Image (cartoon, coloured by chain):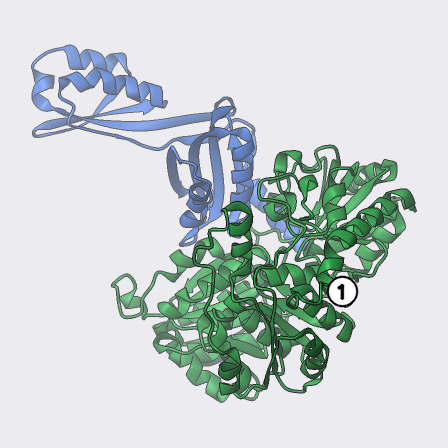
Amino acid sequence: MVTGKAKVMKGCDAIVESLLKEGVDTIFGYPGGAIMPVYDSLYDYQDQLKHVLTRHEQGAIHAAQGYARVSKNVGVCLATSGPGATNLITGLADAYIDSTPLVCITGQVASHLLGTDAFQETDVLGVSTPVTKWNFQITKPEEIPGAIAKAFYIAQSGRPGPVLIDITKDAQFGSLNFKYNKCLEIRSYRPVPSVDLEQVKKAAELINNAKRPMVLFGQGVILGDAKKEFKSFIEKAGIPSAWTILGVSSIPNEHPLNVGMLGMHGNYAPNKLTSECDVLIAVGMRFDDRVTGKVSTFAAQAKVIHLEIDPAEIDKIIKADVAVLGDCKSSLSLLTQYVNSATHTNWLNKFKELDTEEYREVQQKELIPDTNKKITMAEVIDALSVKTNGEAIMVTDVGQHQMVAHRYYQYSSWKSNVTSGGLGTMGFALPAALGAKLAQPNREVIAVIGDGGFQMTIQELGTIFQYEIPVKILVLNNEFLGMVRQWQQLFFDKRYASTELVNPDFQTIVKGYHIPAELVDKREDLSDAMDRFINSNSSYFLEVRVGKEDNVFPMVPSGSSVSDIRLK
Amino acid sequence: MKKQYTIIVYTENNIGLMTRISNVFSRRHVNIESITCSESEVRGVHRFTLVVHVEEEKVIKIVKQIDKQIEVLKAVYHVNDEIVYQEVALYKIPINVFSSGKEIEHIVRAHYARVLAVKGQFVIIEKTGHKEETQELFDALNPYGLIGFVRSGRIAIPKPMESLKDYIKDLESSINQN
């Protein structure tokens, strides 16, 4: 632990200095009264700390999420008290459920005004408690370095999550003896349980005796930085492996053991065969209801092994026969030592058979539709996938386009998926994509968004323009809130209540932000337009008009068993 | 099957922690039957005692979620057989009921209660015991014009010989090893 000499400084400077000590070089935010001292400090630190001014605090926090998801850094955002802070709540909830490390700093009214209904005063600790891993209010300048150090440690250790630090204005103005020590431990907090070798051996024994083992992997593989360990494990044991929406890009899609996506709109084979496997190995995933369908029938025939860092996830939804707590980077490498080399050719072939059926019944029609049909979302994603070699960072919003993007993009690079998985936050993708691009300037970052979600945070085009962020924006426009419309069609007698959108001319809007824009309505124009989109050195907006009432299939109807997945 | 469980939580002394703990219950639509909190035998460590009536499966999940909170040192749950527990109740009676006969005095003696204070117009009676016992005294005194009643939450000590100080020492030494 490096301890420097103490230096007298103002609280607001101490906040900025603390961020620098944590290695932060980019933050996202929006100024306002109660956070003005910090902004005043930022003016002096412009060469060391880049502040990205978004157009709304929700944009700032989603950008910070995108930034964190594709880097090894904590996403940092800054907002003022009251409405500034409450505008962060959706992002906090999103980051909390998707385990994204964030440190959010909010200004607060002066401490003598707390609880007086002062101008722009909100009980931010109270409002943010259910959606933060930890939160804290600073009322004295000397608390600043310690609290920020703790915030960074908590946000990124163990199962990551968002942390909020609320700082009263008097603490920002006051002065302190600044000395920064990184937080390395908290006695009441065990971020990473140690792996119990006995449990690993029990798991290995189940796997070694399995005839039809299957792996379900989630974001834990990526968060645990277990790329090699995961690949070695499934390759040695020869186990077909399926991903949750946040698990994709842990191994390339073309890997022979990658059997596709689980869940409501996932692939046919892994959903069907979850009900036929004899040993199910869940790695860093939490059995979300969109993955399990009806819980009582989910893999009921199988022995369940659960590799998980968070003890509260064990037995939360699906009872584990063998729970292996710990960081999956450690537990997977241990497990690999104890499992026998195996191949499960016949079992793997079952996946291939069902894949063929899915291709014939669903994918073929989506990828090569009748020529009189409108462009399908799948065709667009397929073209994108081919032209980017599956190497782009895909940032998706929420709805039909999100499911189609995950179904048809052939992810080939590690850590290439940013989406709002657990919370399903429309409006997430545009700001998240600009954040991702700032974290990974050398990678292609593509935001795929529906016409509904696009309009929820459309103002962030201003941020993209102001900072010249070369993020690509693909809007799949069906003039509907497509996923809700699909449910209305299938389960509510086609009563399309408030799902049809009368949209503005997106081309004009985007051009107003001085971003090149293009509209494709005809199939024969798609390929060239996609080339221009990908080859552009600046940000580029491509809008594709797709079939208005197209549906996403396969589908596990809500409340049904995953084996009841419908192909149409 | 639903049963009564006592949850004991040891925490750091921080503002807002009470909300974090109670949110675990309210989010799952579980009613807290009683809650008490104060400093434990270890300075700076607070101890919550909560009583709930739920299925064991549910209490296990609740305790895990509480234990997961950053500033919670430890959270455990017990059935009634595993703890020694107590509650205290206070009863406010008009003084004239006392002076006008022997019944109240008999009731107080029979329930092993005691007179805590005599103030001008009224008397305060104190009774410690389990909820059923303080309830029995309530039922006995009620016909005599009871004008005030309050019952504390449960406090409980687990029967096994485990010391909180040792537990915290273990926590700190295992962290130093890492």
Q: Where is residue A341 in the image (x, y as percent from the top left)?
A: 92, 47
Residue B97 in sight from this viewpoint: yes
Q: Residue at x 63, y 68 (%)?
A: A395
- Give above or below for A26 relative to A219: below
Q: Which of A465 and A24 is in front in this view?
A: A465
What x and y, as percent, mark residue A475?
59, 72
Left or right: where does residue B64 sit relative to residue B89? right
| Res. A167 image quadrant | bottom left
Residue A187 position within the rendered picture, expressed as x and y whole percent measured from the top left: 57, 52
* Chain identifier for the green-coloured part of the image: A
Q: The blue chain is which one?
A: B
Residue sitting nearer the eye, A429 or A530 = A530
Residue placed under numbered mark 1 in the picture: A410
**Image spot of residue A176 (x, y percent):** 43, 75
Residue type for callout 1: Gln
Looking at the image, residue A217 lies above or below residue A294: below
Q: Residue at x 52, y 67 (%)?
A: A479
